[in-house]
Amino acid sequence: MKNIIFISLALVVSISYAQEFSEKQIKTAVSEVTVFIENAQVTRKTSQLIPQGKSILKFINLSPFIDAKSIQVKANGSVTVLSVNHQQNFINKLEKQQEVTELENKFESIGKKIQLEQTYLAIIKEELVFLSENRNIGGKSQQVSVPNLKDASNFYSTKLTSLKLKEIERTSTLNKLRKKHRAIMNQLSSIRTKKEFPNGEVIIKIDTKNATKADFEISYMVRNAGWFPSYDIRAKNINEPVELVYKANVKQDTKVSWKNVKLKLSSAEPNASGVIPELQPYFLNYNSLPPIYGKKINQVSGLVSDDSGTLPGVTVLVEGTTIGTSTDFNGRYNISIPNNAKNLVYSFVGMKTQTLPIRNSIMNVTMEEDAVLDEVVVTGYASEVDDSIVSRNSKTKKKEIKIRGASSFAIPITQIENQTSVDFQINIPYTINSDNKSYTVDIDAYKLPAFYQYYSVPKADKSAFLTANITDWEKYNLLEGEANIFFENTFVGKSILDVRYASDTLQISLGRDKNVSVTREKVRDFTSKKFIGSKKEEARAWTISVKNNKPQRINMVVYDQVPVSTFDEIKVEINQMSGAKKNSITGELKWEFQLNSKKSKDMKLQYSVKYPKNKNLVID
């Protein structure tokens, strides 16, 4: 009903416009695209002959996901822009991509063949039932001769063999058709949604005193596009630099393909709030409870689906970061989670974007259809042009990148370093289809001098983690993202390259190294509990051992802790800590040393706790 009312109003408005304005429909191609972490800014350009007086220029065949508030129009010459409006045409819908049309035709053709094979199978099964029910020849009182019995047996055997072979053949053909049918269905689901989308349109009213040829440029923000960074980090051994490959994962499903456009990747977040946060009062009283911290979740996996089944190509982002991934053809995803992350954002074309708190390591999500496109909104905006996104005081660096899976030649880019963001400008035309597929772009590759150190907290995890510590990392313009880790030419897993909290040194975890063994064992002979007057004393002792099984010397740091007293009546005394550095505030102990190949090192930790004997303490 809303659409019918709108169409009627649109016809009335268009008739009144026709009395005063001459209208011209304009088809344009996308010329420039700036892809942000979320969304993209699309620019179209055209030259038009404009008659004298007032005119209406209707730019058609645009994306249905335009943010109307972001539309900007620039016109040169003596043209005056009177107004800019945005609308969605539900009558003239966007044409389907040729690939989608071809796949749909194949899907329908194979579906008919499946029905035909099912019919043949049903007929064969009816014949088998008929043959089985009529195996008896003659009546109960009728004698059957040997020749008749032989003839009947031969007929039954020949007919049964023929029908069974046909059944096997038809069943095999049917299974192959069903497999091909499912493959086409999966391919279709990855490049289109079930909904038909309207034709986005921008209507510009202009006025000119004389007939002229004018150049027009329109730009707007569009949803269902974005990119996120990822990395390949390779360390051949602990004596050579770290090789870091900086990659961009770009995809879009705006329903309009970007053919041979001037493409730019930007780290800016145009939708991020610019409101300065404020501290809230922290009121402390005797009825308040201390904070409760749950177990940290560093990896989340799950299944994303809708009412009809699983959804491939859903974008999953850690809220407030550029860490992201996409669901595979089975709708499954896996993403690494940095510390202090709170929410995951799930977005997919035609579906409502969901922001969900990270509470479990497995998060299955059901997407709901977005009803926003079922209603039509026509809004008018001024024609001012905002060039705030372009930095006038930017530094430019010339670099080269390679497009993975597209070509083997180097593509020149310009890296533009703004005050608050970094842009990567591809200097040759590039194409990204509206197919919801992820295009991987190798932005750059670096060899980074690193200081390698093994890190272990045996109280929490008896593993040695190799870390690469990199200085001067700021000049590489890195963003936080997932990283594939390769050590000694072997894939060892995924990690997080998180630059948000890095200081002058960026620490990259290269994963566990089983060639460095760490143990932490309680010494029973020194573990005791005794009473001394009005006091109770408990003692604890631990032995921490590190063995280097690698062929070279390593740098090692080991952490442990002792309890910290918060009351004067509780006394903590450290009897032995093997030269560790102690943090008196947190009780943290740190051993930092070098360990030669095939050598071991033992560290002793002994402490005692004295407290009133009428009190109870849980001592580790």
Image (tube, grey):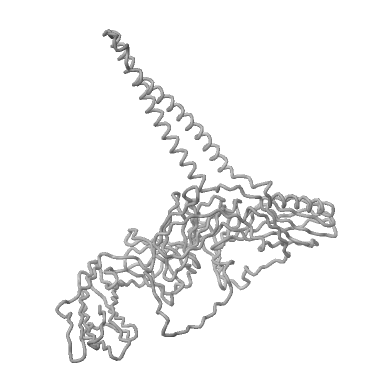
Q: Nearer the viewer, residue 124 or 57?
A: 124
Q: Is residue 126 left or right of residue 209?
A: left
User: Where is residue 154, by image quadrant?
Assistant: top left
Quadrant of the frame with the C terminus: bottom left
Residue farthest front in this picture: 141
In this orientation, which residue lies closer to the viewer: 360 or 460? 360
Q: Using the rendered view, name the quadrant where residue 606 is placed.
A: bottom left
Q: In the visual, does 157 lie left or right of 597?
A: right
Residue 17 x/y as whole percent: 81, 54
> Eyeballing the image, is 579 above or below 73?
below
Question: In the figure, 209 relative to 449: above or below?
Answer: above
Q: Could you say where residue 570 lies in the image, as x and y percent from the top left?
A: 27, 88
- Which percent across, then down, holds residue 361? 39, 62
Could one spot residue 409 in this view of the protein? no
Q: Whole-percent x and y of residue 589?
A: 29, 81
- Above or below residue 215? Residue 469 is below
Looking at the image, which residue is at 50% across and 47% down?
Answer: 308
Q: Residue at x 79, y 62 (%)?
A: 80
- Farthest residue to the left: give it: 525
Residue 553 relative to residue 341: left or right: left
Quick check: can you spot residue 192? Answer: yes
Left or right, residue 322 beside residue 150: right
Q: Looking at the rendering, which quadrant does residue 541 occupy?
A: bottom left
